[in-house]
Each structure stands twice: as C-alpha cells, then as structure tokens.
Image: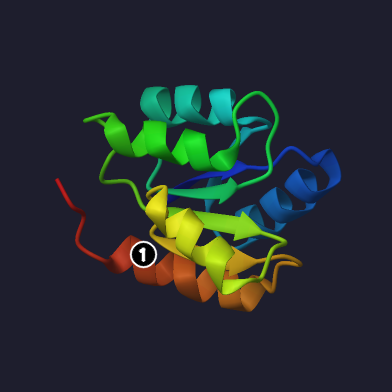
Amino acid sequence: MPRLLLVEDNELSRDMLSRRLARRGYEVLLAADGAQAVDVAIAERPDLVLMDLSLPVIDGWEATRRIKRAPETRGIPVIALTAHAMASDAEQARAAGCDDVDTKPIDLERLLEKVERWLAAPRAP
C-alpha cells in the first residue's frame, strides 16, 4: 500500500482529504505544519508528499527545500497543494523543489492522476 504524507494546516481539509485518500487505498501520514512535515518525511520515508504551501512554523516552500536537501528524502516526489493558481506560484513551487503542483479546491480525480503518475515514475537517487 503506497504511503502518502499529507501536509495541511487546516484540520477540516486535512481530515477530509486524508479520509478520501485512505478510501482509495493509500496509507496516509499527516503533518499540520512544515517543521512536522520534514520530521515525518525523514522518519517515515513516504512514497509521496502532498504539501500545502501556506503553513505555520515553516512554510511549504522551505519544508520542501529541506526534504529535497536531505539525502534520505530527496527522491520523494512532492506535489504542492496551493490555492494560488498563478503561473508564477507554480514556478516558485518548482523552484523550491516541488515536482508538481495542484490547485485548491482539490479535484480528487485530477490529484489522484498526478499521484499515480508520480508513484509510477522512476525515483531520482
């Protein structure tokens, strides 16, 4: 069963999306802020990270940079989740190390297509 790390500070959104992902057969690890995301990613080594960008403690951009800098987690795909749909926001997320971007509100089918594509892709060392 693929393990996803869902990083979302909004408790309602985190609960709803984690339940929907679990119903689709994923094991879902949770983090409510960027610092927690880095800790969980390093400790648990999920198959993929779904990273909200607007987070407390450290934001999603910095959390992604830290995950991508760490040798044990740099190959984990990170999909940014953002309410900002501007092209510059997607560019900024990719510059921080995000492998893909999905916009909020979440379209579950679209997000699942991205998740499956990244889970099937060969991992960088």
The colour style of the image is rainbow
Q: Position of residue 107 (x, y in %)?
A: 69, 74
Rendered position, 89 above or below 22: below
Rendered position, 71 above or below 15: above
Q: Is residue 22 left or right of residue 15?
A: left
Q: Position of residue 77 (x, y in %)?
A: 36, 53
**Location of residue 70 by image quarter:** top left
**Quarter of the image where the C terminus is located:** top left
**Location of residue 35 by image quarter:** top right
Q: Residue furthest left?
A: 125
Q: Which residue occupies 80% across, 41% down?
A: 10
Q: Residue furthest front?
A: 88
Q: Which residue occupies 36% across, 64% down?
A: 118
Q: Is residue 45 visible?
A: no
Q: Which residue occupies 38% across, 59% down?
A: 99
Rendered position, 16 above or below 24: above
**Location of residue 120 by image quarter:** bottom left
Secondary structure at numbered mark 1: helix
Q: Is residue 82 left or right of residue 78?
A: right
Q: Position of residue 45 (x, y in %)?
A: 36, 34
Q: Which residue occupies 49% across, 35% down?
A: 62
**Residue closest to the eye, 88 or 71:** 88
Q: Is residue 1 left or right of residue 51?
A: left
**Residue closest to the eye, 19 or 48:** 48
Q: Give the number of callouts.
A: 1
Label 1 environment density (alpha carbons within 10 Å; few <14, some 14–19, many ≥20):
some
Residue placed under numbered mark 1 in the picture: 118
**Residue closest to the eye, 69 or 117:** 69
Q: Is residue 86 visible?
A: yes
Mark 1 is on which residue type? Trp
